[in-house]
Image (spheres, rainbow, N blue to C red):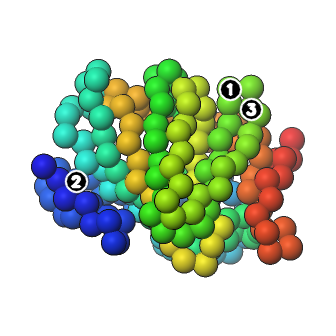
Amino acid sequence: MQRMNWAHGVLEPAPEIRETIKTLGQLEGIFQDASAWRAMDPGRVVYRVQAWCPVVEGTEGGLFWGTTLVESGQVGSEYFMTHGHFHAKRNRSEYYATIEGEGALILMDESRKTWTEPMSPGSVHFIPPRIAHRVANCGSVPLRFVACWPSDAGHDYEAIRKSGFEAQLLNVNGEPKLVRSRT
């Protein structure tokens, strides 16, 4: 059994919980404005992930549970966001449910068509197979959400490192707007 602190959107510490922190310095290449990124503190935390993995990774039929906190902030006009990924097994799905904050789930299919779904407290999102996904915080407080995914899904971050997403979520006149990336 594991304990979830719903008020704070975190899994309670336990030996089975994996925790990862991503800083600006670890996210080279994901933000469109490279000069704005270089001007910022590389040690600044962008997001934190906790994962409860009660079965061995790769176990067919198993599930993992996690929480993510994306800090409020921007690199240039682009909101702080997670790295984003496809699943290594492309036919796997995932669920996200928002606990706190305002943001956007950014989705991209294999033909690179990109769209968003707004995230706010109580919103639940189904991420279909073969869809890359990342989350951006469009608000002024941390964005917290939970996720559930198959333990054999894996993560393909390399496809995103190589080609990025087709569009970026930018702050345009104070509003989030999906803008096609430069080619």
Disc 3 + disc 1, Cβ < 8 Å = yes
Q: Secondary structure at mark 3?
A: loop
27 or 179: nearer the eye?
179
Q: Is residue 97 above or below residue 133?
A: below
Q: In this rendering, does residue 85 appear at all?
A: no
Check disc 2 and report the residue beneath it.
17
Residue at position x 77%, y 46% in the image: 167
Residue 132 position within the rendered picture, expressed as x and y whole percent measured from the top left:
60, 36
- The reply to whether residue 109 is in sight is yes
x 76%, y 34%: residue: 113
The residue drawn where x is 26% and y is 52% is 18
Residue 82 image position (x, y, % from top left): 55, 54
Q: Amino acid at mark 2?
A: Ile
Q: Residues within 10 Å of mark 1 (few under 14, many from 20)?
A: few
For this view, does 154 lie left or right of residue 35? left
Position of residue 51 measured from the top left corner of the image (x, y, whole percent): 31, 50
Q: Secondary structure at mark 2?
A: strand
**How far apart are the two marked residues, 1 and 2, measured between alpha carbons?**
32 Å
Displayed quadrant of residue 131: top right
Q: CA distance from mark 2 to mark 3?
A: 33 Å
Tell me which label, 1 or 2, sits earlier in the chain: 2
Q: Is residue 93 above or below residue 16?
A: above
Could you classify mark 2 by the number of other residues whose Cα lies within 10 Å: few (under 14), some (14-19), or many (20 or more)?
A: some
Q: Amino acid at mark 1?
A: Glu
Figure check: 105 above or below 55: below
| Amino acid at the residue labelled 3 | Arg
x and y, in percent, of residue 13 in the image: 19, 63
From this view, report whether residue 24 is shown above or below residue 133.
Answer: below
Structural distance between the alpha carbons of marks 3 and 1 = 5 Å
Q: Name the residue carrying label 1.
A: 110
- Secondary structure category for the residue under label 1: loop
Q: Which residue is mark 3?
A: 112
